[in-house]
Image (cartoon, rainbow, N blue to C red):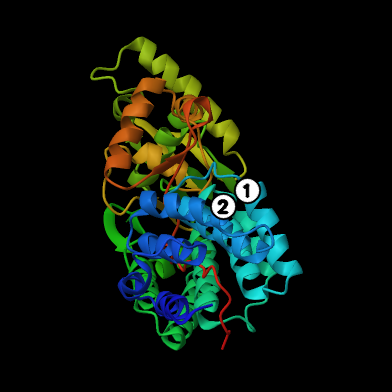
Amino acid sequence: MDSLITAAARALAAGDPLGALKRVALREDAAALALRGIAMAQLGDFDRAKDLLRKAPRAFGPEERVSRARCVVAEAEIAFASRDLAWRRKALDAARETLESHGDQVNAAHARYLDIRRLLLLGRLDDAANALQQLESAALPPALRTVHELLVASIAMRRIRARAARDALTRAKQAARAAGIPALSAEVESAFLALNTPAARLIASGSERLLLLDEVESVLASGAFVVDACRLLVRDRHEVLPLAKRPVLFTLLRTLAEAWPADVTRDALVARAFRAKRADESHRARLRVEVGRLRKVLHTMVEVRATKHGFGLLPRDASDVVVLAQPVAEKHGAVLALLADGESWSSSALSLALGVSQRSVQRALDSLAAAGKVQSFGRGRARRWTTPPMPGFATVLLLPAPLPVE
């Protein structure tokens, strides 16, 4: 490796893409193409980066398998950073195997972290957590230790484990400081900001207040009967019951829970659940049917009792009834609530779960995507929607040429 390539690679490792470009911007050899591609990716020009990283492997000779593999892994990272989740995973696996077989354990580990990030972006939280547990980060360079801890924090935040998330981010901050890469430190600070931003709104006994993730965790552990409008489920100390596919029942339950310990009139329930301005006899008949279904579904958790004017809740094994809602009232809150579990959904599945037309769901998704609140991958019938992962992921692109690992 000549001195300019070495200097450019070290500049990239230190998070200085402009410094790298100054050294290789006019060169067309394989190593320079790869370094230019990574530099452009770090600057955010993913399209140009992809072009350069596709040219680089062809420029490397067939015997330079490790260099070609590093280019493939860097291309995969760019694809995932730009949410191209349909990118060929088999190529990433093959590149990782090549790196492992040739002793490049650092870049091979980075390839594994990329695959875990892909799983998180796809909403496969359990698979991502299991894969992360198989990796030992202690022997890795500080930059990769930072990525490891950011992934740990992201999973913990999804699972509403605030202390575990905070501990992981503290470790990430230490590792980022040791790496000396400003972009990594900024990513960790952004994650801390997300952790310290209100995660839900508590509605109880007629009052409301915002909750941080730590406080949400405390509410869930309190033994109260919780109507979780952020994820469209209910829980008590014994049971968690998803109601995402029963939107009318959930709306009735949320209305009753927000009024607890008072009751709610039949007309108010009809207006909220059926969106009817005036309740006629057909609406009241439907209300009786839906309340009967609600009683059947919740019979082990709460009693839905009739009152003189309407209906009220009587928890069986809880002293309190609370509602967790989105921190800010959201026009498309029901769609966000379904996506909040981290799973990927098709627009048709969302339509069935919400009981509205698919076109209405698509308009809502387009509006939320424009606001950066949801993201999609795939095309046509294979298109799926998720919420952005928490916290954001640092893009620590790989080096295409061997460097000493300190």
Q: Which residue is located at x 50 percent, y 30 percent?
A: 246
Q: Residue furthest right?
A: 101
- Residue in view at x 36 percent, y 21 percent: 359
Is residue 47 rendered to the left or right of residue 80?
A: left
Callout 2, which amino acid?
Arg
Mark identifier at residue 58: 2
Identify residue for label 1: 89
Is 64 rendered above or below residue 326?
Answer: below
At a point 60% along the width and 57% down the height, the residue shown is 115
- Regarding mark 2 in the picture, which secondary structure is present there? helix
- The part of the image, by quadrant, that contains residue 103 is bottom right
Labels 1 and 2: the sequence-earlier one: 2
Instruction: Identify the image quadrant of the N terminus.
Output: bottom right
Q: Is residue 388 above or below residue 351?
A: below
Residue drawn at the location 72% of the way across and 61% of the way down: 97
Given this view, does label 1 or label 2 mark the residue nearer the observer?
2
Foreground residue among 299 and 26? 26
Q: Are marks 1 and 2 in contact (CB under 8 Å)?
A: no
